[in-house]
Image: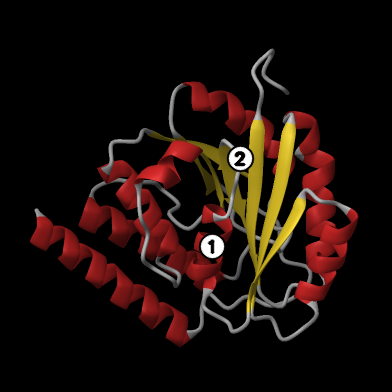
Amino acid sequence: MKRGDTMTSLTVSMPAYNEAENIRPMIDMVRAKVEPLVDDLEIVVVNDGSSDNTGDIVRQISQEDPRVRLVDHTVNQGYGAAVRDAVWAASKELIVFTDSDLQFDLSELERFLPRLKEADLVVGYRYARSDPWHRRFFGHGWSWLVNLLFGYTARDIDCAFKLFKRCVIETIHVESGGAMFSAEFLVRAKQAGFKIVEEPVNHYPRVAGSQTGARPDVILRAFRELLRLRWAMWTKA
């Protein structure tokens, strides 16, 4: 629902790594379900060094639709780096970042937008997460650990459905380039005094492509970045 006479401009920012089967349907979903909710839409996709033709597909779509922008990583830099570059490439006043694997229904953004009247960030949480048990287990444990080390921030730290005002990215700086990105993003936003509210979202099974978040190297990188952030904030306290 467009908000009266107020101009609503929004960027949907997405990382994409080997999502050739998903990326066109994902962009189509954004155009079909988000466009009616806003006055000015932008879609930014970061192709994070994919070995398939993800980048070519987005490039073709961008030639047909100037609202779609491609940012290319020539080599894979990691999930966090792709999300960070997609978010900071946004040009609109509101930004939502999500994944490009079709596991979220972006029509639920309609519930998120009005909550920006009371907060700076609206953070989704998956109340019925459609992932293998080990990913759910790691996800709960990770959120618990982040909240333990930094104080309560959000119940589902890594949920890839976050809406926020542009002033957030104009204020904070995020260094993490791996799976720690969402945690650092929220921790630094909270530290900067921005108000965070939470909203439930549906989560659907991935139907194509493969996940990389449970790889041992991804997990180890996240813990290294977590400890680095905690130490940096302790030493500056």
6 up-or-down from 15: above or below: above
Q: Position of residue 80 (x, y in %)?
A: 48, 67
Q: Amino acid at mark 2?
A: Lys
Residue visible at 80% across and 66% down?
A: 58
Q: CA distance from mark 1 to mark 2?
A: 14 Å
What element does badge 2 sit on? loop
Question: 44 or 119, which is in the foreground?
Answer: 44
Residue visible at 61% across and 66% down?
A: 131
- Marker count (numbered): 2
Give the residue at mark 1: 85
Residue visible at 44% across and 58% down?
A: 182
Give the mark nearest the N terminus, 1 or 2. 1
**Label 1 environment density (alpha carbons within 10 Å; few <14, some 14–19, many ≥20):** many
Determine whether, in the image, residue 58 is placed left or right of residue 148.
Answer: right
Residue that sits furthest to the top in the current view? 5
Give the residue at mark 2: 92
